[in-house]
Image (cartoon, grey):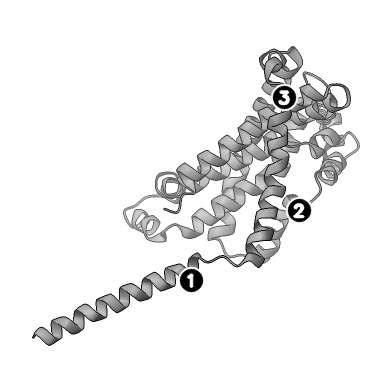
Amino acid sequence: MRQVRDDTARERDDAARERRATSRRRGRVPAALLIPAGLGLLFLVLPLVGLVIRAPWTTLPQRLTEPGALTALRLSVQTATLATALCLLLGVPLAWLLARVEFPGRRLVRALVTVPLVLPPVVGGVALLLVFGRRGLLGGWLDSTFGITLPFTTTGVVLAEAFVAMPFLVIAVEGALRAADHRYEEAAATLGASRWTAFTHVTLPLVAPGLAAGAVLCWARALGEFGATITFAGNYPGRTQTMPLAVYLALETDLESAIVLSLVLLVVSVGILVALRDRWMSTA
């Protein structure tokens, strides 16, 4: 019996030594990987550090309260929020369709949904003009029938932002739907719940974290949109000039104002990433 205990103790010691050795091997980082990794981190962080260092901290409150900055910030928040609402209205059903329904051409539809992610934003603005412009495929009809003109308006800003931001929401919600357990929806159906009731009372609560993460990413992308906005909606102060456009304009005349506006966008972006990591994307 004593021999068995001794053998067991030796096995535990051997296993502990093996775990420690494995941990040490994993902790060793080859210099060939460490050096380029450090350079890559510096490449990404140094521009942000430079922005913080060069910020005119003494005049920051005054510059933030200038009418032009406040107007651009207010317009950016309003249009990004409206664009996110539009993306939720259209993107959630689209994500559900891609995740739960088998139909011919589904891969093609998924690829088309993700095109705005890789499409240059200026090209997206040109495409919006060709569809919603006064001589566009739908814009001409809207103008002649209802007198609705979308380009170079605040509504045009919302459309441009929604066009480039919707893929973020669709991808996040589709992934959450694929990961959700179907048995809860099936149980709701067996209890007599309609498909709409099961979707609103079972499916949406199940995918709420993914939906929230996708909505926040969508809002952040809309807030920072530049290319499609300036191409489709122009750069009119108080009407279509959002924060990124204000930064571009200030860069030509007042570098410090451009830095201040860029710093605001940086703070918003970092805050969103921290919130996503802590609340919805934590893997701990």
Q: Earlier in the sequence, mark 2 or mark 3?
A: 2
- Residue appearing at x 53%, y 59% in the figure: 100
Q: Looking at the rendering, which quadrant does residue 234 occupy?
A: top right
Q: Estimate the x, y position of residue 117 in percent, counting from the top left.
A: 72, 51
Q: Is residue 103 left or right of residue 13?
A: right
Disc 1, SS: helix
Residue tagged 3: 260
Q: Amino acid at mark 1?
A: Arg
Q: Earlier in the sequence, mark 1 or mark 3?
A: 1
- Residue appearing at x 62%, y 31% in the figure: 267
Residue 134, visible in the rendered structure? yes
Whether tag 2 and tag 3 are in contact, CB under 8 A, the answer is no
Q: Residues within 10 Å of mark 1 (few under 14, many from 20)?
A: few
Q: Amino acid at mark 3?
A: Val
Q: CA distance from mark 1 to mark 2?
A: 39 Å
Disc 3, SS: helix
Q: Estimate the x, y position of residue 157 in percent, counting from the top left.
A: 76, 31
Q: Residues within 10 Å of mark 2 (few under 14, many from 20)?
A: few
Q: Earlier in the sequence, mark 1 or mark 2?
A: 1
Seen in the picture, residue 251 relative to 169 is either above or below; the reply is above
Q: Amino acid at mark 2?
A: Val
Given this view, does label 1 or label 3 mark the residue nearer the observer?
1
